[in-house]
Amino acid sequence: MDYQAVLDYIREAVEPKFGKGKVADYIPALAGVPGGKFGMAVQLADGRNFKTGDADEAFSIQSISKLFVLQMVMSHFGDMVWTRVGKEPSGDRFNSMIKLEMEHGVPRNPFINPGALATLDLLMSLKGDTKQRIRNYLRYLALNDSVEVDPVVAKSEYEHANLNRAMAHLMKGYNNIHMDVDDLLDTYCYQCAMAMSCVDLARAGLPLAMGGYSALHDASIISTSQAKRINAVMLTCGTYDSVGSFAYRVGIPAKSGVGGGILAVVPGKMAVCVWAPELDTFGNSYVGTAALEMFTSLTHTSIF
Ligand code: GLN
């Protein structure tokens, strides 16, 4: 398969789709990101990688960070995480609170905002600086020591985090958040504001594609069973309340973020990351979803 040709083809084929989505603006610092950006990168298990467009440009990973924090928490706490958060799709927006009270402060899954807050709360119970722990982990996974937070995005999100703050307080009321809410929010905004490129993220996603083992790192990053489970949660919960149509169109596990990135995994083969900042109404990259749909069709890599 000529992956370079496929990526270059997709980059041209998505051109007419620009201008139909909308760059996230509820976090003011993200509103200024140019909507016409497009990058895509493929990382194969054998170490080969391919890229097109703005694949080396760092962008705000936002909710893609939830995937890596879940990975860290599962490495440290194993299945204990599932006592704090469920593994069912929510059917609601990523920042919805509607089920949270009815379900006694236990979020549906780790990829909606309340679920990510509960997961991070568990990570913060470990000794040491959680921000540094997250940054170092992302640097290690991306094999890139220059991975860094964007402090402007982190501050902007923190200042506009009323909904996330409300969720955290509600969960604290149900004893499902143990940390100080301000510290939790501050760390959450930090993880979301990490800036990484498609190339970084495709590398970081490789262990999930390869049963936890990455030849690039020459290490097992997570266990095979954990990789299997995280992929299942990505497939069923990774793209929020459009997860069904995403699976229908793209057909592989994926995690999106409102920065316009989507990291997807082809089990046994590769990780693919796309970035295009204009979002659909569900908060997933509009052009990015179309690009991944083309990718799995052209390369026959849907798992279905
Ligand atoms: N930081 C964003 C928020 O909390 C993450 C949401 C997302 O990427 N879907 O709203």
Image (cartoon, rainbow, N blue to C red):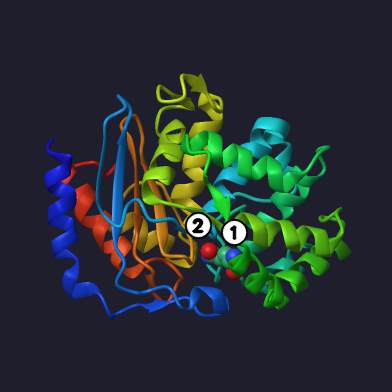
With 132 as the anchor, is 38 left or right in this view?
Answer: left
Q: Nearer the viewer, residue 146 or 279?
A: 146
Q: Please state the horizontal and vertical placement of residue 256, each as a whole percent of the image.
A: 45, 58
Residue drawn at 67 percent across, 74 percent down:
98
Residue of label 2: 61
Q: Are marks 2 and 1 in contact (CB under 8 Å)?
A: yes
Q: Residues within 10 Å of mark 1 (few under 14, many from 20)?
A: many
Mark nearer the N terminus (2 vs 1) = 2
* Residue that protrudes farthest toward the front in the picture: 146
Q: Quadrant of the N terminus?
A: top left
Residue of label 1: 192
Q: How many marks?
A: 2
Q: Amino acid at mark 2?
A: Ile
Mark 1 CB lies closer than 8 A to ligand 1: yes
Residue drawn at 25 percent across, 59 percent down:
291
Q: Residues within 10 Å of mark 2 (few under 14, many from 20)?
A: many
- Is residue 32 among the parts visible in the rendering? yes
Against 138, is 297 above or below?
Answer: below
Q: Dividing the picture into quarters, in which one does residue 15 lie?
A: bottom left
Q: Could you tell me which secondary element the residue under label 2 belongs to?
A: loop
* Residue 302: assigned label: none
Against 205, is 171 above or below?
Answer: below
Mark 2 CB lies closer than 8 A to ligand 1: no
Q: Could you tell me which secondary element the residue under label 1 belongs to?
A: helix
Residue drawn at 73 percent across, 33 percent down:
77
Q: Please state the horizontal and vertical placement of residue 228, each as a whole percent of the image.
A: 49, 33
Q: Nearer the viewer, residue 219 or 303?
A: 219
* Residue that protrudes farthest toward the top in the picture: 218
Residue drawn at 32 percent across, 52 percent down:
55
With 81 as the anchor, is 51 left or right in this view?
Answer: left
